[in-house]
Amino acid sequence: MQKGEWMYLYHDDQTYFLPYEAGGSFSTHYGTLCFPENLEFGDYIETNKGIRFYVLRPSLADLMMKVKRRTTIIYPKEAGIILLELGIESGSKVIEIGSGSGALTVLLSRIVGNEGKVYSFEKRPEHQEIAIANVKRFGKPDRVEFILKDPVTEGGFGVGEVDGIFVDIPTPWILVPYIWKALRLGGHVGFLSPNIEQVQTTIKRLEESGFVRIRTMEVWTRGIRVKEFLTRPFDRMIGHTGYLFFAQKVKISAKEYVPDYWI
Amino acid sequence: MQKGEWMYLYHDDQTYFLPYEAGGSFSTHYGTLCFPENLEFGDYIETNKGIRFYVLRPSLADLMMKVKRRTTIIYPKEAGIILLELGIESGSKVIEIGSGSGALTVLLSRIVGNEGKVYSFEKRPEHQEIAIANVKRFGKPDRVEFILKDPVTEGGFGVGEVDGIFVDIPTPWILVPYIWKALRLGGHVGFLSPNIEQVQTTIKRLEESGFVRIRTMEVWTRGIRVKEFLTRPFDRMIGHTGYLFFAQKVKISAKEYVPDYWI
Amino acid sequence: MQKGEWMYLYHDDQTYFLPYEAGGSFSTHYGTLCFPENLEFGDYIETNKGIRFYVLRPSLADLMMKVKRRTTIIYPKEAGIILLELGIESGSKVIEIGSGSGALTVLLSRIVGNEGKVYSFEKRPEHQEIAIANVKRFGKPDRVEFILKDPVTEGGFGVGEVDGIFVDIPTPWILVPYIWKALRLGGHVGFLSPNIEQVQTTIKRLEESGFVRIRTMEVWTRGIRVKEFLTRPFDRMIGHTGYLFFAQKVKISAKEYVPDYWI
Amino acid sequence: MQKGEWMYLYHDDQTYFLPYEAGGSFSTHYGTLCFPENLEFGDYIETNKGIRFYVLRPSLADLMMKVKRRTTIIYPKEAGIILLELGIESGSKVIEIGSGSGALTVLLSRIVGNEGKVYSFEKRPEHQEIAIANVKRFGKPDRVEFILKDPVTEGGFGVGEVDGIFVDIPTPWILVPYIWKALRLGGHVGFLSPNIEQVQTTIKRLEESGFVRIRTMEVWTRGIRVKEFLTRPFDRMIGHTGYLFFAQKVKISAKEYVPDYWI
């Protein structure tokens, strides 16, 4: 393992997430762990009290969940569907707004590959700073352009022909005309909003502004404990993070109604 | 649009999915559509009865759902989480078994990029044939190696050091030792099984065969109709497709218990 | 079994629901059943093709689900919670509006006992007729007063001091002042509405009209097949019937704001 | 209000549950409440800091949730369905085992009315004591017979021809033959078990012991906050309490297989 590589240290009911450094040590609830030279993923190490921790490779879901947060983040259950509905793949050009804590940026940067590009917009400098730090830590910063800008007051995104756009801001409806301009024809936009009124307001605007095939959904996951004669779902689950909704851009002819807020 | 490019033809309550051919025509419930020269995504065309259909770009979710099927397929709600939990990104090397109808293969081939690779195993030639056709149609066939083989009777996968493995066969537990061999250290394996006994049997074997951090979950999505004064979730939803479960490979020392079915 | 008593005829994948008559017969997909003298619940009878059907006692849930319908009905999953949240028990006085197909009326009439009373309001005679027939068939008609009336245009319910009120009409908010008048102090009202805007409109009115402790919920059930090595949840489930919401009546002082629609 | 009557004291984000006593007082997070003479349900009283609390009538759901607990209790979401599937109504005779903390006993005692009867079995005296106290507090103790007994070691229930039986013990399968004996023909039995293996074991025994129409389900509820421009489901929900399963008793002929554990 390289110095600085992130390890998921795993014991049954306790996990830690930290960067590797040979000779370093770390205190857990089960005693102190010391990290030897030449530690590899798949190895285990023991605390001074003899408790075994496995050294695991973090998944994309782990990286997203472990970002340092200043905002609520997007969960893997929603992030996976966002990729598929927006059609984000190796080589895609994608806008996200806002950067938030950068959890989704980490994911997008790893999916779009070296030929792809992520444009990550944010208007609050203190959030952008965290997002940048998180992408440096867990993502592929070379593939991300961080832009500190409010597209509404500063003339739109200034980027065009992108394959997909993902929006997670409190007032997504104000972005609709800018989204239309930035997307390629037939391109996909997705939104995550916690309140139904945000969904209703945004969808109304999408319908009158050159978007079709608008669809809304919720996603849930429930963990299950599989253990001999004790197999049962977990008692608690997340009941709601937000409504996910998607639409696709179509052409607007000059003769059609153009809302007065249109650019 | 190129000849042969797949279009998602969209009218409110009717959609069609077919390849573009200038001069071609197609019969719908709302009359006949003729496809002009120079049709572009985002355009609309009208049937001879004046009903408008939009020409939309399919998302990854659309491509997965539109494969020709001979088997049950993996839904986007599960596929997204599989990507994130296995850590499949641009450049990944991944095994899937079985190929099934190729819905997941389509997705994986688009995510792994030109530097990545998908090894898709299948033992029934008639399934493999369909999977190959579907990947040619909707995926990136150059990035996929289709292998007609039963790893149990034919000496394992014959591929090693892969980043992730996804298993969707009726008896996943028999593959556990072969999975262990093929995965890189710390690598992730995921399974989808409809019945809880399949999960229980496979997890028991994983626990005794060099895998840790085993976790199981269910995923649901529910569509919501957002329409003025008629906003409500859809009446029907999918209650179950399968249990998703994941594990990570760790080293096994010579002194540890090695099950007798071990290779 | 008495003549006319309702039987739930049960074979693994086929069930029928009909009244008993000695000497009668009935055609099923598995052949003809003849009903002997002295048939008892728990017996089985065989068709002329030798297929066994069990003669079972219907549950309350069965009776509700088997009413002849002209409207959507309330499902057991919601009905059970309605009883508990409204505090309907033996001896309760309860209003329901509208009668619909009488599925809930059947249930309420069986719960309130001989000392209780159900006032079932309906404004469409053709619905009331069906509800009356269903309660005669499956419920306790002596405990129900069916009232053909629109409380909004005809001066309210004309019944007072009831323990609980259940409302299932498309515009529940117009009833709020009449509900307040008819309920005893501290009494509970419940609503079932399919669309979120119905909930929002009604709750706004409740909040300004002498109701507190307003709470809203959804209820789901999912069936599970338990069978050796084939244990799994059912593929399909009901994703939405409606939003259930509840409130409690409190006193309104003369000094407080009284909405102009107030009676 | 009578002395000792239970009040649900309600302020937006704070509720209390206690018996009324004129002249009494109670400390809340918002200051002290004093209870005047002639307090009525629907009144409000204010703390010494001027915060208003409403005096509400508890629902059946409230009574169940407010029992003093020594065990996990049955939630209203399951309890409502239990009533409907077992066919518990005014006049029913019902067995429950075990008494637990008496939450379900409170409910059953209020539903069965003066002509009905609840036989509540429990083998641990310390649990029975709590159940009795809770039923005295919130239920109808005259309608309940509390029986301190283990039916397995002490010769069965000793009660017969009951309409329904509800079972919530860790090893429900051992009771199957005793349940068969105590139920009337065609009668319903219900179970709540947290682990799937308990369900599997019990259902296997039911199938070979004179029960048919066996069905299993899960129930979920999710709360929703309805507030202007902030309408959204609650973040957290209960993911699992247990599996509910039901069956109906049929006759067993002498010629059929009788398991050796049969009485």
Image (cartoon, coloured by chain):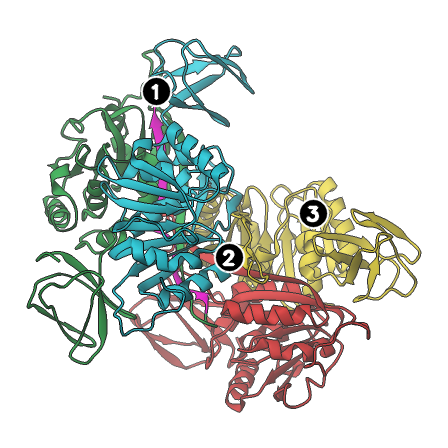
Chain colours: A yellow, B red, C green, D cyan
Output the chain of dot 3. Answer: A
Q: Do the residues labelled 3 and 2 touch (CB within 8 Å)?
A: no
Which residue is the site of mark 1? Answer: D41
In the depicted view, which residue is nearer to us: A123 or C255?
A: C255
Q: Do the residues labelled 3 and 1 touch (CB within 8 Å)?
A: no
Which quadrant of the view contains residue D91?
top left
Which residue is the site of mark 2? Answer: D195
Q: Is B128 displayed left or right of D3 in the figure?
A: right
Could you classify mark 2 by the number of other residues whose Cα lies within 10 Å: few (under 14), some (14-19), or many (20 or more)? many
Where's residue C171, x and y in %?
Answer: 27, 38
Distance between the alpha carbons at the discs numbered 2 and 1: 42 Å
Distance between the alpha carbons at the discs numbered 3 and 1: 49 Å
Q: Is D17 displayed left or right of B160 in the figure?
A: left
Magenta-tinted stretch: C231-249
Where's residue A202, x and y in %?
Answer: 48, 47
- Which is more foreground, mark 3 or mark 2? 2
Distance between the alpha carbons at the discs numbered 3 and 2: 38 Å
Output the chain of dot 2. Answer: D
- Looking at this rendering, what residue extends furthest in the left direction? C23
